[in-house]
Amino acid sequence: MINVASSAQISIITVCYNSASTIEKTIKSVINQDYKNIEYIIIDGSSIDGTQKIIEQYKDKITRVISEPDSGIYDAMNKGIKIATGDWLFFLNSGDIFFSSTTLSKIVPQLNDDFVLVFGDIVLDNLDNSTTYVPQRHITNLAGIIVGVCHQAVFFSTKIKKELLFYSKNLKYCSDLETLLKIEKYYSKKKIKKTDVAICYYLSGGLSDTNLNVVLDERKKIINSFYEKYSIKWILNRLNLFRQYLKYTSKKK
């Protein structure tokens, strides 16, 4: 095994649009990391609310900024992938922050040539100012190692084939799940690693949280396209979707 973790460059991509209220804390979270081999890219969708002025204040700490209209979050994320030059990719979008200033120092030793995906745990930043620690699934899960893993917990090796990394713009909310499943299907399970490192605070209440019916429908279609109907993985993942629906509806009561 060749461990290149000690010198790995991490390309961190932040996607934002009209995020004046949240972008600064995300930027500070990145530039305050004690691990400094970072390429920091911000993709802004031509914000008009002051976001660009805030980004400008930190321009000497940011590797590259693109501010132009896009067709949605996945189009913006693809732009970041195209220009990233680091060894590993990580998406930390506006409103999300690293768990601590030592997060990258803790995860980088886990990033080596044996793996194409490495993921850890997240903490949900709830709308009521509370937080919920969410440990991600381990690779022994019968339903598949990726379904249910939060995208904000995942580091992607740039050795992954580009056509697998790019996000489909045909899905509004769940293209990240489709991308993870494509990678899982192409590479051996041995190429994907779960760690117990807490990665980030993930801002709850985003688009996918507020449009659950559309999200579940997209996830259902994705699962149907990757797993044979009535197979163990298909059944377990459909049950998982049903649990998500029940959990969401119980909160609404």
Image (cartoon, rainbow, N blue to C red):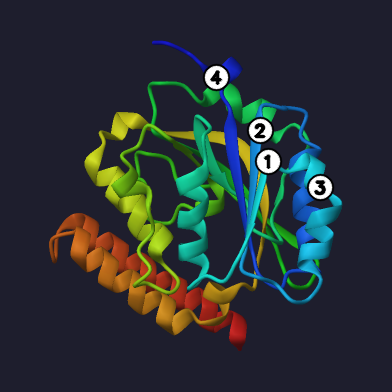
Q: Secondary structure at mark 3?
A: helix
* Residue at 43% from the left image edge and 74% from the top image edge: 172
Q: Which residue is mark 3?
A: 28
Residue at 50% over, 44% down: 83
Q: Earlier in the sequence, mark 2 or mark 4?
A: 4
Between 127 and 179, which is closer to the camera in this rendering?
179
Q: Are marks 1 and 2 in contact (CB under 8 Å)?
A: yes
> Which comes before the other along the chain, label 3 or label 1?
3
Q: Sequence-wise, which precedes: disc 3 or disc 4?
A: 4
| Amino acid beneath label 2 | Ile
Q: Which one is in front in this view, the residue at disc 2 or the one at disc 4?
A: 2
- Gap in angstroms between the C-alphas marked 4 and 1: 21 Å
Mark 3 residue type: Lys
Q: How packed is label 3: few (under 14 Cα within 10 Å), some, or many (20 or more)?
A: some
Q: Nearer the viewer, mark 3 or mark 1?
A: 1
**Most extreme residue toward the right, as rendered?**
57
- Gap in angstroms between the C-alphas marked 2 and 4: 13 Å
Q: Circle 4 is placed at which residue position? A: 5
Q: CA distance from mark 3 to mark 4?
A: 24 Å
Report the residue marked by disc 2.
38
